[in-house]
Amino acid sequence: MITDRSYAVEPWCVRETHLDLDVLAQSESVFALSNGHVGWRGNLDEGEPHGLPGSYLNGVHELHPLPYAEAGYGYPESGQTVINVTNGKILRLLVDDEPFDLRYGRLESHERVLDLRRGVLERTCEWTSPAGSTVRVRSTRLVSLTQRAIGAVAYEVEAVGSRSRVVIQSELVANESLPEPNGDPRAARALKSPLEPEEDVAVGNRLRLVHRTKRSGLRVAVAADHTVTGPERTTTSSESNADLARLTVTSVLEPGEQLRVEKLVAHGWSGARSRPAMSDQVEAALAAAGHSGWQGLLDDQRTYLDDFWARADVEVDGDEEIQQAVRFALFHVLQAGARAEQRAIPAKGLTGSGYDGHAFWDTETFVLPLLTYTAPEAVSEALRWRKNTLDAARERAAQLGLSGAAFPWRTIEGSEGSAYWPAGTAAFHVNADIADAVVRYVAATGDTDFERDTGVELLVETARLWRSLGHHDAHGTFHIDGVTGPDEYSAVADDNTYTNLMARANLLAAADVVERHPEEPAALGVDAEESAAWRDAAAAVHIPYNDELGVHEQHAGFTRYQRWDFSGTRPDQYPLLLHFPYFDLYRKQVVKQADLVLAMYTCGSFFDEEQIARNFAYYEPLTVRDSSLSACCQAVVAAQAGHMRLAYDYTAEAALMDLADLEHNTRDGLHIASLAGTWMALVAGFGGLRRDGDSLRFAPRLPEMFSRLAFSVQLLGRRLHVEVGPDKATYTLLSGPPLTISHHGTPVSLNGDGPAVRTVPPVPQRPSPEQPPHRRPGAR
Ligand code: BGC
């Protein structure tokens, strides 16, 4: 765990000023570079020491049998695990007779900087070998956002004080040995040597390795090319064998002289293409990158990010740490989704192997809202991935005796990867979350082509699922029994409010889309009777309510359960899932993560302000936040209910989840949903952003620690800038046709002639709710 501040607080970068080997694995996640297709953990250039070596290609996984002590019908038989592919970022260094290894000798200085505007990781260090030779090493690394196959490193060594003989070995390494798993069920199973060699080539400065996974049959090709600059006496040679290709660069440096290697690395994978085709593919990608050159790649990266920041930046005055953290969050969420291109956006992005590299509902509910309003092209790609996996989802529904499509709870390639069905298969809400993401994207972009070619099928098949999963009782009320909502400390429960409200929206959205695009649904066999049945079910959905307490139930009967013994639970017994049986968690009132509280955000129009305040006060003392997905949701609803200080503390928790390693597992990869949740806490919490059909509502209010919050959203071809101060909010239409939004319930017309300024009403005063003992968010 990162105990003291590891990173300097600066607005546009994350700077580590000294190397702490105890938190190396965490820093590798924090400094990971990715474009959604290729992911490189922030491992040190020379490969060792390392916490967890990691190079990932989105979608490249291996299959493994899922063992069950007692198997049952419909249990998934095969699991999927992300694998560490060929590592192209390694550059080893020998100084005189000593390997440059920071565990030995004397580290005079070591600094790494993740530059959020340039999209590069920079490292500078000065090291004296055990024999007394001093060198300065500088490296700059990027994973290109404009050329999706490409990663690149510029590595420079300088002799300091005396003449040094230096050797740089630039390598491609397959089947790196990985540390043993740490026993945390949330970490990945490390598959030993998952890649079988097919081709190794080293010609001049060019290297190439082609491998294939054993069971999933995916071919992985990685190639590198180098430009070497150094004194005249510099020589190079290259060689390769099955799992290693190496360029060796040797030189003698006088004090002040430098040896520089620019390394371009191209990655490709396919389940279909032949070995020669894959070799050609990576060679072609290298040629394209070489055409841009190192400087060209740097310039393109900057241009790409300038454009992103112009659309997505969130400015926070009054808390520099949150300012830095929200930019760090935006950067990593962009990295996770930017070039995923019809592949999943995993819960850890491509920053680590935690959760086996699986994607969950985290994508649609946490990541896609941010991207919808800042980088919408990534959203259509992510949802097209879901569409591409529809066949597997239809098969799963049929296997379960249901209609339509049942999307997996966790997956890489589309089939269900959860071996624990009470919190896997039964978490059907993922289907409504996908539908919600479709509706949100179409409302924000007006992309009717997408709606027709992708949205219709997703909405129809998920509506069919709900219609078959639920049933009308003798009074006509529609129930969805035996499902698991977002809170994984309750399972297989009847009428989960979140699920029911989201399913209701899903059913209505499907019925609406059928009216807008009659042809495609007809081809899917939808008739008037079917869509009328969706509307009937939606109109009759049961939402459980406890009249005595005056609160909504998380699921039917929840408020009758015994309360968890919070006062008898020690601080070191959190997260509860690692210390208590699910059996006991399921039958008590204890909430892992926002569930009913999340429903009040995603389906806010169902609740009035008083209900929101009452429900929030009821669920706060039960919610232990054992999931990193919770704090951001609680921040949004706390802000709405007027608990500004609490909302601020929750925002900080979401924002600092990884920079401060709050859940002690950043080593396994970043918490992408919590990072995206930082945006949600600021923009939906303090900005009060809510969807309202095709328009947006805002209800901004700042906590007293902030003097200003500013953000932009893209909506239907417009760019809207919102700036909030303690007393007033300013709305400016930066581009696009006139637009009407709402400010605290009052319409505001914006026409581009100038900003509209509105007064921020006072915060409603309510007693601050309690949290379970030891689970209050850290006060700042
Ligand atoms: C949470 C899930 C989440 C998963 C991946 C679990 O701990 O309870 O809601 O989808 O982590 O982030």
Image (cartoon, rainbow, N blue to C red):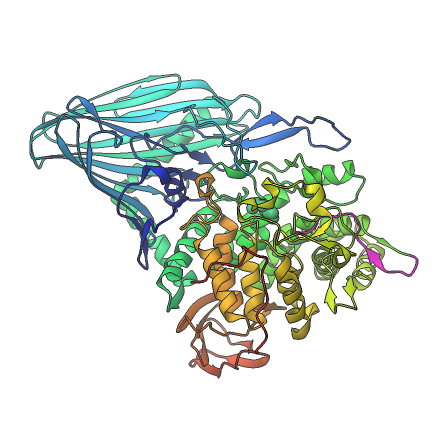
- Residue 32 appears at what percent x and percent y? 39, 42
Q: Is residue 308 visible?
A: no
10 with respect to 777 (left or right)? left
Q: Is the magenta stretch mostly helix, strand or loop?
A: loop
Task: Please give the name of the residue rendered at 52% of the width and 27% of the height, measured from the top-left corner.
Answer: 218
User: Is 527 rendered above or below residue 39?
Assistant: below
Q: In this view, does 108 lie to the left or right of 63?
A: left
Furthest toward the right, the residue is 474
Of 607 and 774, the residue lying toward us: 774
**Tally of numbered tags:** 0
As rendered, which of 530 and 554 lies closer to the eye? 554
Residue positioned most to the top = 241
The quadrant of the image that shows the N terminus is top left
- In the depicted view, which residue is nearer to us: 10 or 336? 10
Q: Quadrant of residue 297?
A: top left
Quick check: 339 above or below 504?
Answer: above
Q: Give the range drawn in magenta.
A: 474-486
Residue 726 in the image: state x and y as whole percent.
44, 78
Q: In which quarter of the image is the C terminus?
A: bottom left
Is residue 482 one of those drawn in magenta? yes
Q: Residue at x 75, y 68 (%)?
A: 549
Location of residue 718 in the rendering, given as x and y in whole percent from the top left corner: 48, 68
Q: Residue at x 67, y 70 (%)?
A: 614
Residue 503 is at least partly visible in this image: yes
> Where 577 falls versus 287 (above or below)?
below
At horizontal 53% and vertical 59% (from top left) the residue drawn is 776
Q: Quadrant of residue 562?
A: bottom right
Taking the magenta stretch, the answer to whether it contains residue 338 is: no
Q: Where is residue 206 in the image (x, y as percent from the top left)?
A: 30, 26
